[in-house]
Image (spheres, rainbow, N blue to C red):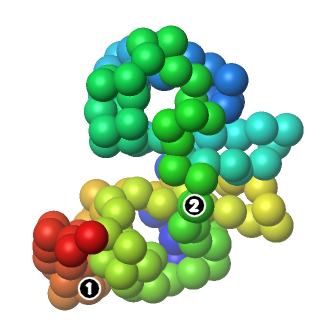
Amino acid sequence: MNVKDVMSREVVTCNPQDYVNEVADQMRTLDIGCLPVVSNKKLVGMITDRDIVTRSVAKDVRSKVEDVMTKSVISVSPDDTTADASIVMARNQVRRLPVMDNGLLVGFVSLADLAFPFPHVQEISNALESISEPRNY
C-alpha cells in the first residue's frame, strides 16, 4: 500500500509570519498537534505543539511562527510505501509527515493513518516503539 492511499489530502497550513498564539489556538480548535508552514506554496517548516511549548511559551508571547518552527522537514512522497513511511517516522521519532510531490505539499500522513487498515502491523509497532524511545542529546 502507498502513502497516497492513506494520507489526508486536505491539509491546514500556516505561514511564517503568523503569530504563534494564533496558530496554537487554531491547533487547539482543530485538535491537531502540528501544522506545516508554507510560504509562496513551498513547505518551509513545521510547527508542533512541542515547538510552541519549548521555544515560545517561556519567551515572547508575540513570537512568530518562523521564530519557533522546525526548519528541517522530513517528508515522504505519495508513491512511497506505507512501510517506508513508518520506517522514516521511526528513524526520525516523529508521528506525522508531510507528503510532497514535485516540491508541493499534497497531503499529510500520520502514524494513525498507517495503522488502518493495518497491513503492516509489525512496521507500525516498530515505528511507535522507536518514536517513543528517549533521545540522548
Q: Position of residue 17 (x, y in %)?
A: 68, 23
Say left or right for 107 vs 53: right
Quarter of the figure that contains the C terminus? bottom left
Q: Position of residue 39 (x, y in %)?
A: 77, 38
Residue 8, relative to residue 123: is it above or below?
A: above
Quarter residue 135 falls in:
bottom left
Count neighbours of disc 2 (C-alpha within 10 A) and say few if under 14, some if 14 to 19, many if 20 or more: some
Q: Is residue 31 visible?
A: yes
Residue 118, relative to residue 96: is it above or below?
A: below
Q: What element carries label 2?
A: loop
Q: Where is residue 41 in the image (x, y as percent from the top left)?
A: 81, 42
Residue at the disc numbered 2: 73
Quarter residue 103 falls in:
bottom right
Residue at the disc numbered 1: 123
Front residue of this view, candidates 127 and 91: 91
Q: What element carries label 1?
A: helix
Quarter residue 50 falls in:
top left
Could you give the CA–CA distance between mark 2 and mark 1, rounded to whole angstroms? 22 Å
Residue type of the residue flagged with mark 2: Val
Q: How many marks?
A: 2
Q: Can residue 10 be seen in this view?
A: no
Front residue of this view, candidates 132 and 30: 132
Q: Which residue is drawn at 30% across and 25% down?
A: 58
Q: Residue at x 50, y 83 (%)?
A: 81
Which is in the foreground here, disc 2 or disc 1?
Answer: 2
Q: Residue at x 43, y 79 (%)?
A: 88
Residue type of the residue flagged with mark 1: Glu
